[in-house]
Amino acid sequence: MPAAQLPVDHACLIVHGTDSPGIVAAVSALITRQGANIVQFDQYSDNPAGGAYFQRVVFHRPGLREAMPAIEVDLDRTLGTGFDLDWSITDQSTPKRMAILASKQDHCLLDLLWRHRRGELPVEIPVVISNHTDAEADVAGFGIPFVHVPSVPGPDKSASEARILEVLADADVDVVVLARYMQILSADFLERVRVPVINIHHSFLPAFIGAQPYRQAKTRGVKLIGATSHYVTTDLDEGPIIEQDIVRVTHADTAFDLERRGADVERAVLSRAVLWHAQDRVIRHGNHTIVF
C-alpha cells in the first residue's frame, strides 16, 4: 500500500483480559498523559462482573515513533498494576508483511494482488509461494516474487514444508494467507511458522468441512452456499472464524454453478478478513474472534 495512504502517527492499542471497573478511565488517562488523542474506540465485555474484556483504541500522537518506548513503559506500569490484562500496540504506518500460499485456482490470489495494487490492503506482499507454476506469470506482472515449492507425493510433507518455512523466514513475514492453497498444513509447520495463518474455506462452516464442499452442497440440496475465512489450527477447518458470507442458490444450479458463484463470495470474504487482520481489528479468544 502506498505510504501516503497509511495513517501516520497513529497507533492501535489492543487490550484484553478480565473485566473490572476503571479500565476505560485508565487507558484514556494514559493516552491523554502521553500527549495523544483518541480517534477510534471500541470495547466489548461478555460479562461486566469479571468476564472477558476486549478493547481496541486508535490514537494519534505527533512524533509517535519517538514516543513509543515511553508509551509502552506507561502501558506496562498502568495495565500491569491492578488489572488482569494483556496489551499490544502497533504503529499503523508500518504495514504488515503478508505472504500468500496458492495452488492452481487463482481467483483469491489474483484478487488479493489486485486489491493490494489499488492500495486497498495496508500490507506488503514480499512473496507468493505455490505448489504449481500456473500463476507465476500473473504474479510477476504485479512485480511480486514467486517461489515454486512442489508438493511432495505421499503423506509426508516435511520436505516441502521445510522449504516453505525457509522462504517465509527470509521474507520476514507477519502473516501467511492461504489463497485456496488446498494443502493441509502439519502441526509441526503451524508451530514453527510462528505467525498467524489465515485460510479461506469454500463453504459456510461448520457445514461441509474438508474436500469438495460444493459437490457436498449440491448433493445435500442446500439453498444457500457460502465461504468462511478463519485462522488455521491443527483441527481441520475448525479454527477461529474471522468472516463469513453467503449467496442464495436453487435446485437448478449445478455443482459447477455453485463453484462459480461461490468463487465471488470467497474473494470478498478473504479480502475482508485480510483487511481486518491488517488493521488489528481481530482479537482471538479461544476458538472465537472479536472483530471490531
Image (tube, rainbow, N blue to C red):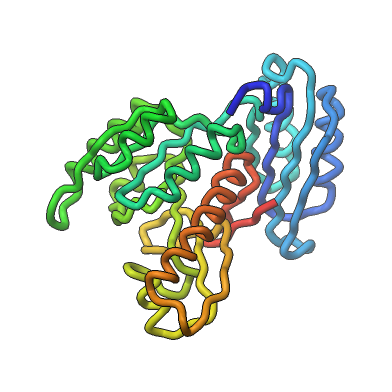
- In percent of width and height, residue 260 lies at 44, 64
In this rendering, position of residue 199 left or right of residue 163: right
Q: Is residue 206 left or right of residue 64?
A: left
Q: Position of residue 4 (x, y in %)?
A: 67, 22
The part of the image, by quadrant, that contains residue 133 is: top left
Give left or right: position of 278 versus 85. left
Q: Residue at x 17, y 42 (%)?
A: 159
Q: Quadrant of the N terminus?
A: top right
Residue 38 vertical placement versus 190 (above, below): above
- Of 269 and 243, nearer the camera is 269
Residue at the spot 53% in from the left edge and 76% down from the top edge: 249
Q: Is residue 215 visible?
A: yes
Q: Nearer the viewer, residue 91 or 112?
A: 112
Q: Is any part of residue 172 visible from this angle? A: no
Residue 119 picture location, percent across and down: 60, 32
Q: Which of the 4 quarters of the picture holds residue 291?
A: bottom right
x, y (%) of residue 289?
59, 57
Residue that appears at 57% across and 62% down:
244
Q: Residue at x 43, y 61 (%)?
A: 201
